[in-house]
Image (cartoon, rainbow, N blue to C red):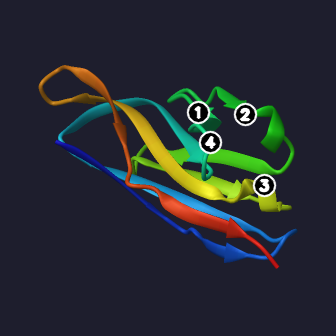
């Protein structure tokens, strides 16, 4: 099986910064795309940013210029550097990864989520 564990969430004031990390572990043969999604109360889960193994990136329009996604393929990790945070960034942030396991099959796996709260 594959596990994704996020860390780095917390409470931050508007204009502040946070860095989220996500580590994938388990029966991993390779990882293609990795990404971050978020879900605010009463809203649907939405894409924040996504990065392929080769480094192609796409961002949600609402975070462009403020948030940077990166990954370390050797460590099976993905990061989300969030700057100039706004109250509307408050949400549970979820990591996901498209993983090919040792069985040869590929599936999308999700972490348990980490809370980000932007408030004064």
Judging by the rendered image, the residue that carries numbered circle 2 is 59
Disc 1 secondary structure class: strand
Sooner in the amino-acid sequence: mark 2 or mark 4: 4
Residue 11 on image: x %, y %: 66, 76
The quadrant of the image that shows the C terminus is bottom right
Sooner in the amino-acid sequence: mark 1 or mark 3: 1
User: Quadrant location of residue 104?
Assistant: top left
Between residues 10 and 119, which one lies in front from this camera angle? 119
Foreground disc of the pair 2, 1 = 2
Judging by the rendered image, the residue that carries numbered circle 1 is 51
Sooner in the amino-acid sequence: mark 2 or mark 3: 2
Measure how far apart labels 4 and 1 are at the Cα level: 24 Å
Disc 3 secondary structure class: helix
Q: Residue at x 83, y 60 (%)?
A: 86
Q: Residue furthest front?
A: 42
Residue 119 on image: x %, y %: 77, 73
**Labels 4 and 1 touching (C-beta < 8 A):** no
Measure how far apart labels 2 and 3 are at the Cα level: 16 Å
Judging by the rendered image, the residue that carries numbered circle 4 is 43
Measure how far apart labels 2 and 1 are at the Cα level: 9 Å
Judging by the rendered image, the residue that carries numbered circle 3 is 88
Disc 4 secondary structure class: loop
| Residue 69 located left or right of residue 78 | right
Foreground disc of the pair 2, 3 = 3
């Amino acid at each position: 099986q594959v596990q994704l564990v996020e860390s780095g969430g917390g409470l931050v004031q508007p204009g502040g910064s946070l860095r989220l990390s996500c580590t994938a572990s388990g029966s991993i043969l390779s990882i293609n795309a990795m990404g971050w999604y978020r879900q605010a109360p009463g809203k649907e889960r939405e894409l924040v940013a996504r990065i392929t193994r080769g480094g192609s990136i796409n961002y949600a329009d609402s975070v462009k210029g403020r948030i940077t996604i990166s990954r370390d393929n050797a460590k099976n990790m993905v990061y989300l550097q969030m700057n100039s945070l706004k109250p509307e960034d408050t949400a549970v942030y979820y990591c996901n990864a498209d993983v090919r396991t040792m069985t040869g099959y590929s599936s999308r796996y999700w972490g348990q989520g980490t809370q980000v709260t932007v408030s004064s």
